[in-house]
Image (cartoon, coloured by chain):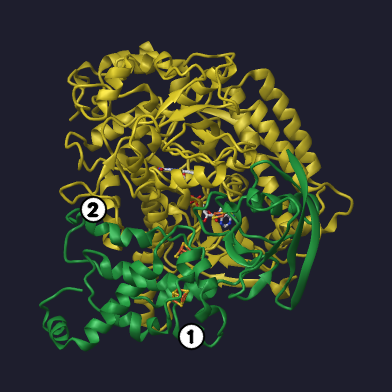
Chain colours: A green, B yellow
């Protein structure tokens, strides 16, 4: 079972570009990335796209399909009708390098700003943690760094100036992950999220949660609890006193 | 051309940002050296990210009977005694420390009820041994080390103001040539930025190859585009050796449908957690395929196999958990005998054996993968699976203790690109531990080498640089040449059909003829477009590596006239002890590949003593066996 599909793919670079029309064969069971690869192999050998695992595990193949941030390798062609024209464009929140490849270095810069895991005073091999306690952080460690959430978040997407002050959902879950790590020795993760990561700019639209291919509940399980912790810590003088004199760990 | 050549100076270059490369970088930087990490993909996307099942380390958290000796023994058995025993020894001894160390970097493994790192069962491992995080262990490993590297950069920033003063990642750069001084010592590496196509030159007295495997030479594979055997080919061209290249692991369970995902891995944990293999008649056929060397170590009835999951001390494990080569061959035979599934595989069934909640908890990404890609709900229906090219046991011949590559001063190799550790067949979970153990050793080894040079720096001649640049640009010069994609497909088909899971001399010879033809045609490739992020050009450059590596596989496979581990010869179906003590060594020979035999060093007595004489008799020749001091072997099998 195969048919010819109509595709419009954005071709160009930092200086500009345009949507180019293609007609290309589609076979049973294929995903959008297969079609992009077929274009490369048969019609335009220089069509630029990132990919690695082809199984939704590496987060390389992020792009926008009909305007929706998606993984190319996890979008099955069967979700479209044969008559539909499928438009594939690069992530809008990041500068284009070429075709579907964007410059995502913003994310690596943000990653470097978060203070690293602070190991407890325990010898290697002596760490003890309960499964229920690690599970909260494990949810966030499922992140494949596809940056689809960063792409869809209007704070990042629509306002270039915000990029300086706002870390974006991906790195708010990183802060939450460390905050909830049973053995992380720092207790200022929530403060950091407020002061350095701009958690206050998030207005809980939940768009990030909706696009996350790992189904991480970014807003409900990370951002909202972190916001509450920020509020709690700032306004509850007892909690504040506790953290200062070491009565309570982060 | 020179105007656009960027140049950088480092003490140690790490080519590859998978588990091995990152661990090596951490070690080199911690030894105080200025270190660069170079990788073809974005940082954090290397192949290691795809590993699912776990990291093998005999921590004994789930069964306290485990020890490095038992792990060593399992590894040697899995590799059919062709392993570098010294590597297997170091690996078994050091894996637990390397795993615990990851916790100090922030890793969060799944836990046992008493709060330790949980460990799961896997094929060929006597006890539950694989530290894991659900079925996304590789992601945890990569992310943890990525974050450790960021943390070291933060330290450097505090100290010097520049986070990249001692450790820098060059992402989306492909190395095309190693640079050497006239004596052959490593002087650096040459490559291009994938993004711009511009050339870049790194000067450094030590290079650690951590480039992973070669799967993209085969049509059906679990490997990504990165696996074009670059490190293998770089080492060959630099004058080093490859060992064990005839041994390629076909993982028994890859997806077989739909066609576009054919080859994508279905983790062995499905079987470790209770999944069983069935043919079209509904029979658990693995019971018919337990080979002599493993008889006595596996259950003979379904009842016993099933009891083992809850009571492993008094029952034997089910044969679905035999080493991968055995299971892959069994599936191949069932399909050939006409008892396969509709799409040419067999059935892997966990739905009828475990509760849906348990499947979702333990195998979330498998559930996701089948749901999204094949429209199959693995909590309700069986999966269809078949063999897929997964891992190459062969690789750069290295010194076990320092990871120094043979014959090229300053060159090191670790991870899948290195050879020896796994012998003829790797056990599941033994790669991630290999990356950590030998990654760390390679980083330390490279640092020691550089420190030993006392400030002396091998220098490369300008002519070498010019030649590297000219070679890389050749595909743009040619007009009317061939399409690299077409050539690549032909090569993959050839390797799959003629040097695949079952081999014969006649077929391998045909493959070699076709490879010769492809090599000649690859001299005349044409790519369209320009140098900026141009996948056609990248493939054209990768092709020469894949062709060199494929030739190594084929030549070594032709020479080894026996079947062992990841090398099965239909015309020599038995394992032959006379071949046990011999490695096949590939090296560059003009435009081609030369292969020769090399005797292996005899195993140390205390290690031999870990095996019973009966078992040694299955692998060693009568002469070798006679030379084993009788005092060395004993019968309780628990080791010292
Ligand atoms: C689907 C899957 C599941 C697996 N599951 C397990 C498991 O559960 N347990 C286990 O132990 N093993 C598993 N393995 C095997 C294991 O993941 C790999 O063997 C291992 O990750 C290889 O790691 P590495 O560090 O050697 O290389 P990789 O992680 O592959 O990294 C190679 C690096 O080298 C870079 N590189 C390559 N060529 C060049 C070049 N020319 N220039 C610059 N950079 C270059 C790449 O960009 C990449 O960064 C699995 C493998 C697959 C495919
Ligand atoms: S919930 Fe917050 S972080 Fe997520 S998309 Fe909306 S504004 Fe952005
Ligand atoms: S949180 Fe989800 S959407 Fe965001 S980068 Fe991670 S995996 Fe992607
Ligand atoms: S290619 Fe890895 S997520 Fe799509």
> Separation of disc 2 and disc 1 at Cα?
36 Å
Contact, mark 2 vs mark 1 (Cβ under 8 Å): no
Figure quadrant of residue B55: top left
- Left or right of B149 on screen, residue B511: right
Say which residue appears at 56% left-offset and 24% top-offset. Answer: B341
- Left or right of A13 on screen, residue B131: left
Which label was assigned to residue B449? none
Q: Is residue B555 visible?
A: yes
Q: Which residue is denoted by mark 2 in the rendering? A: A131
Q: Which residue is denoted by mark 1 in the rendering? A: A164
Check disc 2 and report its element: helix, strand or loop.
helix
**Which subunit holds the residue at mark 2?**
A
Horizontal and vertical percent position of residue B67:
21, 36
- Left or right of B468 on screen, residue B617: left
Horizontal and vertical percent position of residue B503:
61, 22
Check disc 1 and report its element: helix, strand or loop.
helix
Q: Is residue B580 above or below residue B356?
A: above
Say which residue appears at 80% left-offset and 49% top-offset. Answer: B525
**Which subunit holds the residue at mark 1?**
A
Horizontal and vertical percent position of residue B548:
66, 40
Q: Is residue B284 above or below residue B473?
A: above
* Of callouts 2 and 1, the N-terminal one: 2
Horizontal and vertical percent position of residue B124:
35, 29
Q: In this view, does B452 lie above or below B611?
A: below
Q: Depth check: B299 or B349 in front?
A: B349
Q: Which of marks 2 and 1 is in front?
A: 2
Q: Depth check: B166 or B206 in front?
A: B166
């Amino acid at each position: 079972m195969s048919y010819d599909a109509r595709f419009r793919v954005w071709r160009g670079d930092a200086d500009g570009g345009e949507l180019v029309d293609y007609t290309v064969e589609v076979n049973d069971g294929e995903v959008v990335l297969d079609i992009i690869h077929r274009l490369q192999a048969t019609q335009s050998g220089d069509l630029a796209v990132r990919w690695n695992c082809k199984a939704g595990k590496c987060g390389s193949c992020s792009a926008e399909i009909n305007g929706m941030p998606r993984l190319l390798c996890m979008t099955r062609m069967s979700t479209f009708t044969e008559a539909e024209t499928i438009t594939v464009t690069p992530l809008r929140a990041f500068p284009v390098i070429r075709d579907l490849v964007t410059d995502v270095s913003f994310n690596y810069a943000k990653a470097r700003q978060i203070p690293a895991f602070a190991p407890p005073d325990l010898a290697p091999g002596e760490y003890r943690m309960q499964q229920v306690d690690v599970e909260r952080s494990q949810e966030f460690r499922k992140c494949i760094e596809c940056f689809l959430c960063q792409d869809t978040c209007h704070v990042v997407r629509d306002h270039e100036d915000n990029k300086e002050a706002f870390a974006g959902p991906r790195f708010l879950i990183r802060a939450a992950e460390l905050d909830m790590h049973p053995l992380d020795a720092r207790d200022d993760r929530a403060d950091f999220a407020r002061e350095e990561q701009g958690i206050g700019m998030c207005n809980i639209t939940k768009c990030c949660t909706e696009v996350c291919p790992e189904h991480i509940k970014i807003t409900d399980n990370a951002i909202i609890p972190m916001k509450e912790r920020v509020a709690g810590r700032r306004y509850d003088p007892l909690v504040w006193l506790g953290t200062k004199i070491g009565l309570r760990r982060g | 051309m020179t105007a656009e050549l960027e140049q950088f100076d480092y003490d140690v270059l790490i080519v590859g940002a998978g588990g091995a490369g990152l661990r090596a970088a951490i070690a080199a930087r911690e030894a105080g050296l200025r270190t660069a990490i170079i990788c073809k993909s974005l940082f954090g996307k290397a192949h290691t990210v795809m590993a699912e099942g776990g990291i093998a380390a005999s921590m004994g958290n789930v069964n306290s009977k485990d020890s490095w000796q038992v792990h060593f023994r399992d590894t040697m058995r899995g590799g059919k005694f062709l392993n570098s025993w010294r590597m297997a020894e170091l690996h078994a001894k050091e894996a637990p420390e390397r795993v615990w160390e990851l916790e100090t970097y922030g890793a969060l493994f799944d836990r046992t009820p008493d709060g330790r790192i949980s460990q799961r069962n896997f094929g060929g491992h006597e006890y539950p041994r694989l530290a894991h995080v659900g079925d996304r262990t590789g992601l945890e490993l990569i992310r943890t080390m990525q974050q450790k590297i960021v943390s070291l950069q933060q330290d450097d920033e505090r100290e010097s103001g520049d986070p990249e003063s001692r450790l820098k990642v060059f992402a989306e750069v492909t190395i095309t040539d190693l640079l050497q001084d006239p004596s052959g010592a490593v002087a650096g590496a040459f490559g291009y930025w994938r993004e711009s196509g511009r050339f870049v030159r790194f000067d450094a007295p030590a290079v650690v190859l951590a480039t992973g495997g070669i799967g993209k030479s085969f049509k059906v594979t679990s490997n990504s585009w990165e696996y074009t055997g670059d490190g293998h080919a770089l080492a060959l061209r630099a004058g080093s050796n490859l060992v064990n290249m005839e041994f390629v692991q076909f993982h028994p369970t890859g997806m077989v449908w739909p066609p576009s995902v054919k080859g994508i891995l279905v983790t062995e944990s499905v079987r470790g957690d209770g999944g069983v293999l069935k043919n079209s008649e509904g029979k658990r056929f693995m019971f018919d395929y337990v080979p002599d060397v493993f008889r006595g170590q596996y259950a003979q009835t379904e009842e016993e196999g099933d009891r083992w999951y809850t009571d492993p001390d008094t029952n034997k494990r089910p044969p679905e958990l035999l080493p991968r080569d055995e299971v892959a061959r069994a599936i191949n035979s069932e399909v050939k005998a006409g008892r396969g599934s509709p799409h040419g595989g067999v059935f892997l069934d966990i739905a009828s054996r475990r509760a849906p909640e348990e499947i979702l908890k333990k195998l979330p990404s498998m559930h996701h993968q089948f749901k999204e890609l094949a429209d199959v709900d693995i909590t309700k229906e069986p999966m269809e699976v078949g063999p897929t090219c997964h891992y190459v046991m062969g690789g750069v011949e290295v010194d076990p203790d320092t990871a120094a590559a043979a014959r090229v001063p300053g060159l090191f190799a670790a991870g899948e690109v290195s050879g020896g550790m796994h012998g003829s067949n790797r056990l599941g979970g033994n790669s991630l531990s290999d990356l950590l153990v030998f990654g760390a050793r390679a980083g330390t080894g490279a640092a020691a080498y550089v420190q030993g040079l006392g400030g002396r720096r091998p220098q490369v001649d300008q002519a070498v640089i010019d030649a590297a640049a000219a070679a890389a640009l050749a595909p743009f010069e040619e007009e009317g040449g061939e399409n690299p994609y077409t050539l690549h497909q032909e090569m993959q088909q050839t390797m799959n059909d003629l040097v695949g899971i079952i081999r014969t001399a006649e077929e391998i010879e045909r493959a070699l003829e076709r490879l010769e033809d492809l090599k000649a045609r690859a001299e005349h490739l044409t790519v369209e477009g320009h140098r900026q992020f141009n996948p056609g050009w990248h493939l054209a450059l990768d092709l020469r590596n894949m062709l060199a590596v494929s030739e190594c596989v084929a030549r070594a496979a032709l020479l080894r006239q026996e079947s062992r581990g990841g090398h099965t010869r239909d015309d020599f179906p038995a394992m032959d002890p006379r071949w046990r003590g011999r490695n096949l060594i590939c090296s560059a020979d003009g435009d081609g590949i030369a292969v020769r035999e090399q005797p292996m060093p005899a195993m140390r007595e205390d290690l031999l003593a870990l095996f019973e004489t009966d078992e040694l008799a299955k692998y060693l020749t009568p002469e070798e066996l006679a030379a084993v001091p009788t005092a060395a072997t004993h019968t309780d099998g628990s080791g010292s």
